[in-house]
Amino acid sequence: MAAPIFFGLQFLCFAFAIIQTRADLPGTWELLVPNAGIASMHTAVTPFNTVVLLDRTNIGLSNLSLPNGECRDDPFEEDLKHDCSAHSAVLDLNANGIRPLEILTDTWCSSGQFLSNGTLLQSGGNDDGNSKFRMFTPCDAASFCDWVELQNVELSQGRWYATNQILPDGSIIIIGGISISSVEFFPPRSSGAVDFPFLVESRDNQTDNLYPFVHLLPQGNLFIFANNQSVLYDYDNNVIVKKFPILEGGPRNYPSAGSSAMLALKSDYSTATIVICGGAQYGAYNNQSVNTPAQGSCGRIVATDPNPIWEMEEMPFLRIMGDMVMLPTGDVLIINGAQAGSQGYGLATNPCLNPVLYQPDQPEGSRFMTLTPSSIPRLYHSTANLLPDGRVLIAGSNTHYYYTFGVDFPTELRIEAFSPEYLTANNANLRPVVVNTPTAVQYRQLYNVSVTVPTPLMGIVEVNFASAPYNTHSFSQGQRLVKLVVTSVVSNVNGQYMIACTAPPNGMVAPPGYYMMFVVNQRVPSIASWVQLTS
């Protein structure tokens, strides 16, 4: 009876989605690039209004050629030892144009994070890329910049399926990976690695602990979650400070991937709340059961509470391989993924086309809102990133080992943008325009932002810093939103408003680096200005 019941439920979910589609649901979709040439498995937005796209090098030919007849020759490559196609590219958001980049070693299931100077550090991968560091220093779309592979620094252990997090001093910590229960840093430092047993525990060889969810809390310690377990880690003293309660409802990390986000940091920055949503049923990956229903639960925990507990909620849809994107308002967009199966090539079905808006400040039971569905399934290896104009860039999805087309879930080369409801024409009169702001601020610095607004400013005005994370495999590494303290909003004689605000107090609240600064008026954000936060 199990299969007929499931397919009946699956039909009901599909019918529900159709009914919802006919309604006037919030949000709109647009196709930005009909053929990017590569399926972006790893995606990051730069301060130059460009987006770095990364695939893997050992997947065979992509649909994007390297420029000027260039080719990559690698005698250790499994598939193509002579490859003239690109496996990375940069997207110019102003023109929606694609420029190929050359990456030398395999980036399959690697990790990344922006350094404080705006350079993207990319680490690990598979085969010849397992211990490599790569750097991409972004430039404007009219200039030339490309990947540089570091020759004098390597990972001490090969990192495959690891997670990176920038720290308050601007260094990077790299956590996890297949069969690795230790951490290391960039630049390298000697710390004597602590063991995280839950990062390598195995139940019937299904580990469910890859790409651990890592969040830097505002007190400086790290919240690390894998499978259904989590700890508070003091990386400076190399000790586990606390073990959190088990999150019920099944595994949450690769290959049973849910997603995770830390809610907006605000007020005195003393409270940090973590939300983890979705995942696969335990055993779906081991049994290769593509029709096993996904999880629909979310766990929410105040990680800074002395006695934290998980508060459980249910999403409108079951979902694995979803992405959680922090919006400028402090709401969370849950997007992409499937309603059945697990991560891995060809192991998921029943795409979850409807995004969901999670509104954390609403009462429990009324926090989820169903949004307008996409027409493009985004399953394994899809990505979602916040853009400076408030849209969310959606890319990737390749459920096959090679580039494969003409099947149910083909390799996806189209790039879309989803516009939340705050970007509708009805909200245009509320949208601020930033006319003057510093391009760099220091911690605790009091500074002014000048804006214009079509209608007079009323109510609460926010100035919010949003990081530019490295998104891959259902988790945005380094993602955070920090709401600044606004002390006054004064109208000027020239029709502008001057907003006085204070930069974040330290690197624990907001690590040094480049942030998208949004001015938010009645939950409608401006186009962001990039601001470098320095010590």
Image (cartoon, rainbow, N blue to C red):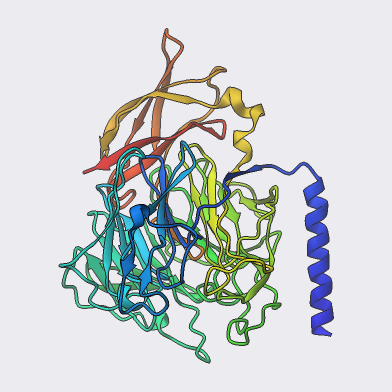
Residue positioned most to the top: 493
Image quarter in which the N terminus is found: bottom right
Q: Residue 173: where, in percent of width, then height?
A: 29, 65
Q: Is residue 19 above or below residue 453?
A: below
Say which of 64 and 199 sits in front: 64
Q: Is residue 365 left or right of residue 516?
A: right
Q: Residue 333: where, in percent of width, then height?
A: 58, 51
At horizontal 53% and vertical 21% (from top left) the residue drawn is 457
Q: Is residue 476 above or below residue 457?
A: below
Residue positioned most to the bottom: 204
Tell me if I can see residue 382 in this picture: yes
At horizontal 37% and vertical 46% (from top left) the residue drawn is 46
Image quarter in which the C terminus is found: top left
Q: Is residue 10 above or below residue 471?
A: below
Say which of 255 and 406 sits in front: 406
The image quadrant that residue 365 belongs to is bottom right
Q: Is residue 523 left or right of residue 180?
A: right
Say which of 393 and 221 sits in front: 393
Q: Residue 322: where, in percent of width, then height?
A: 58, 62
Q: Is residue 520 above or below residue 31?
A: above
In this figure, what is the number of numbered marks? 0
At horizontal 62% and vertical 84% (from top left) the residue drawn is 288
Tell me if I can see residue 218 in this picture: no
Q: Residue 295: where, in percent of width, then height?
A: 65, 71
Residue positioned most to the front: 69
